[in-house]
Amino acid sequence: MMRTLFAAIIFLAVAGCSTPPELQDRPYRLKHPSWFPEPVIPADNSLTQLRVELGRRLFYNKAFSSDYRISCGTCHVPSAAFTDGQPVSTGVHGRPGKRNAPTLANLAWMPHFMMEGGVPTLELQTLAPVSDSNEMNLDILQVSRRLSEDDYLTSLSRAAYGRAIDPYVITRALAAFQRTLVSYDSAYDRYEFLGQKDQLNEAQLRGRALFFSPRTKCGGCHGDPFMTDFEFHNIGLYTTYADPGRERVTYDPADAGKFKTPSLRNIALTAPYMHDGSMGTLQEVVAFYNRGGQDHPNKDFRIQPLGLSPAEEADLVSFLESLTDWNFVQNINHLPLED
Ligand code: HEC
Ligand code: HEC
């Protein structure tokens, strides 16, 4: 009896000390500008300092892939606004993926994930690349086992979520970190929302007027403040699409070739463009819209020949370049830690 009690006291003392003082958790205040609405954060994954920190370490951890060579950050590189510069991403063993890696800015406001919108929450989204045989190619339980061998990650997990590393913790911590990737400080934002009129040059001002005009209708789908309507549209990229897009989740042929409108924030940093990375430059994209796209029964009515002059095309490109947020891509809180 005495011995059991003694053992219990020792155990409690050790357990009590197992959280180093630097691992005391505190709420994390998500900074966002007045021109963004309040984000909806799931009640079971409120943001805290340690959840975000754990998520950051997991995001850059290569134990996520079967060959230990690929982390989330391999395809979502901070300096490229969390894209990878390739037409379609390369996964484990150099296997080519099917789509272009999208930017990860402002995910806290995104209502559905993936280009066809088939994944309802950021927590669930994590499971897709991990198990995809062309991406990370690993079972999430195997990832948990690998990560559990790391004592520091384990103590972070206990301090942040009150439990050892498991799929529950992995999906939530990655989501927590990704919700902190907020981008709102482009020259365009400063001009439009902070009234700093010197932020855009003449060409960018002309491009802005064109972008939001009834003539081009760009702003109809890529509107403020996220530069996307989060809806699904077919823009007439092909007469026959190799990738079914939205049809993949609805099985409705009327959705063939529809993709979630990508945000144009940081667009100058995220080439190549479109779901399949088929366009290398913004000039090419604008020339495509100017031609009005290809015939497709599902093509949105707004995609029509625009009759833009070469100078007007160049102005639109200049405006798109004003959407870069340098503080976002250089934010040290988003970068991997060397430990
Ligand atoms: C091999 C490259 C690759 C790796 C590794 C990878 N991703 Fe992705 N990611 C992509 C591609 C490509 C897409 C677009 C997929 C689609 O829409 O079908 C994507 C989509 C996403 C999205 C959805 C964004 C949106 O706009 O809907 C999120 C969030 C995301 N990835 C986070 C992660 C996380 C977290 C990890 C690590 C667990 C990860 N990715 C690993 C290439 C990758
Ligand atoms: C009907 C809605 C709609 C309109 C109008 C529209 N877009 Fe898009 N835009 C989209 C969708 C959807 C995609 C993704 C298409 C795909 O990947 O197949 C896209 C893709 C893009 C991309 C590439 C984004 C990336 O990350 O790959 C750029 C740049 C772009 N649009 C700029 C413009 C400009 C400039 C205009 C006006 C000339 C415009 N868009 C008008 C819906 C629209």
Image (tube, rainbow, N blue to C red):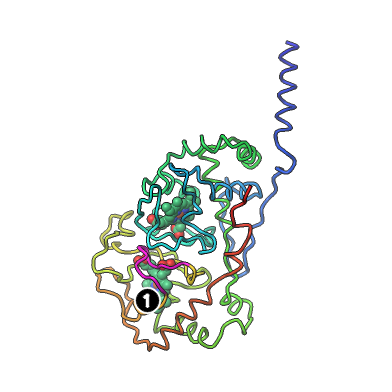
| Secondary structure under the numbered disc 1 in the rendered image | helix
Quadrant in the rendering for residue 98: bottom left
Q: What secondary structure prevails in the magenta region?
A: loop
Relative to 199, is 83 above or below? above
Relative to 230, is 189 above or below? below
Q: Which residues are magenta?
A: 270-281
Q: Residue 332: x and y, percent?
A: 63, 59
Relative to 12, is 188 above or below? below
Q: Is residue 122 left or right of residue 301?
A: right
Q: Residue 126: x and y, percent?
A: 47, 48
Magenta-colored stretch includes residue 9: no
10 Å neighbourhood of mark 1: few (<14), some, or many (≥20)?
A: some
Residue on which disc 1 sits: 284
Relative to 239, is 120 above or below? above
Residue drawn at the location 32% of the way across and 75% of the way down:
301
Magenta-colored stretch includes residue 279: yes
Res 120 visible? no
What is the count of numbered marks?
1
Q: Quadrant of the N terminus?
A: top right
Q: Residue 106: x and y, percent?
A: 54, 62
Q: Is residue 317 left or right of residue 251?
A: right
Q: Residue 296: x and y, percent?
A: 25, 70
Q: Is residue 332 left or right of residue 292?
A: right
* Residue sitting nearer the eye, 219 or 163: 163
Image quarter for ligand 2 equals: bottom left
Res 105 visible? yes
Question: Tag 1: residue type?
Answer: Glu
* Residue sitting nearer the eye, 273 or 24: 273
Residue drawn at the location 53% of the way across and 46% of the way down:
61
Residue drawn at the location 30% of the way across and 71% of the way down:
236
